[in-house]
Amino acid sequence: MLNHRNTYIKIIAECNFARPRVSNKQIIHFANVSPATVTEMTRSLEHAGLVNRRRYTGVTLTPTGEQLACQLLRHYRLCETFLVQKLHLPLIAVPGQAWGMAADLTAETALALNHYLGAPQHSPFGGSLNPTQILDDSPITRLSAVSVPTIVVLTSYLESAALVDYLQHLGLPFGVPLQVTKVDASLNLLYLEDAQQQEYTLNDQAADYIYTKKA
């Protein structure tokens, strides 16, 4: 059975990536719960020493919370990798299934799964499987924060079902240089172009959860 505390820790860790703090609005969106429920849960996590809360501005993980988040995300990403590499599940089905599997994964099973998969370095969505790098966002910039014109490489993204579906529809390429050519604030759109001058247009809400490194 899924542990609600762990689900919130996962959401906070993912939303805190490449950001100084996680807003209650983000947690409400990804947990799909009421503001009152988020307030109650983050207060409980604070009492457990897992998060720091600031009224009106959101939360961050404590060192203890980060340690737990690293373990949870590594187990989650191992399960994602297994479902894609060995069961060939459609990407859109992977995040939900993987989190359900990861909920009961023991450290011993995770070690065996890592060995069985050949010690993968990244999940199918680009997230690191190296315990020392899972929460390391120092070289990372959100696509929505990249200035124009800049050439970047898309490295990973937050694998919500909606974003997975959206990016598959766009055919947005990862791991290759792309130039951010234009930002249209009035339409909330961002434009990218590859080396063959193929243009890609995406909304800034999606770009907020796509992560880049300089090319």
Image (tube, grey):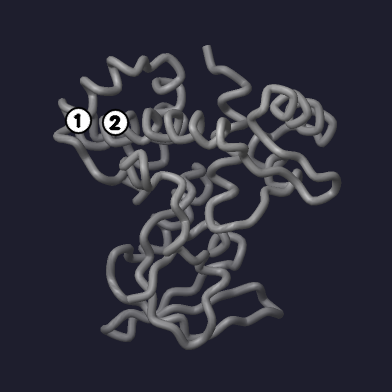
Badge 1: few (under 14), some or many (20 or more) residues near its Cα, within 10 Å?
few
- Residue 87 left/right relative to 28: left
- Looking at the image, is 179 positioned above or below residue 83? below
| Residue bearing the label numbered 2 | 83
Q: Is residue 142 left or right of residue 73?
A: right
Q: Position of residue 139 (x, y in %)?
A: 42, 64
Figure check: 81 above or below 156: above
Q: CA distance from mark 1 to mark 2?
A: 6 Å
Q: Position of residue 82 (x, y in %)?
A: 26, 30
| Residue contact between numbered discs 1 and 2, judged by CB atoms under 8 Å | yes
Q: Is residue 162 above or below residue 191?
A: above
Q: Residue at x 69, y 47 (%)?
A: 26
Residue furthest to the top in view is 1
User: Which residue is at 36% across, 36% downward?
Assistant: 77
Residue depicted at x 48% and y 55%: 166
Q: Is 13 placed left or right of 125 in the picture?
A: right
Residue at numbered disc 1: 86
> In which quadrant of the rendered view does residue 113 lie?
top left
> Looking at the picture, which amino acid does disc 2 mark?
Leu
Residues 18 and 185: in front is 18
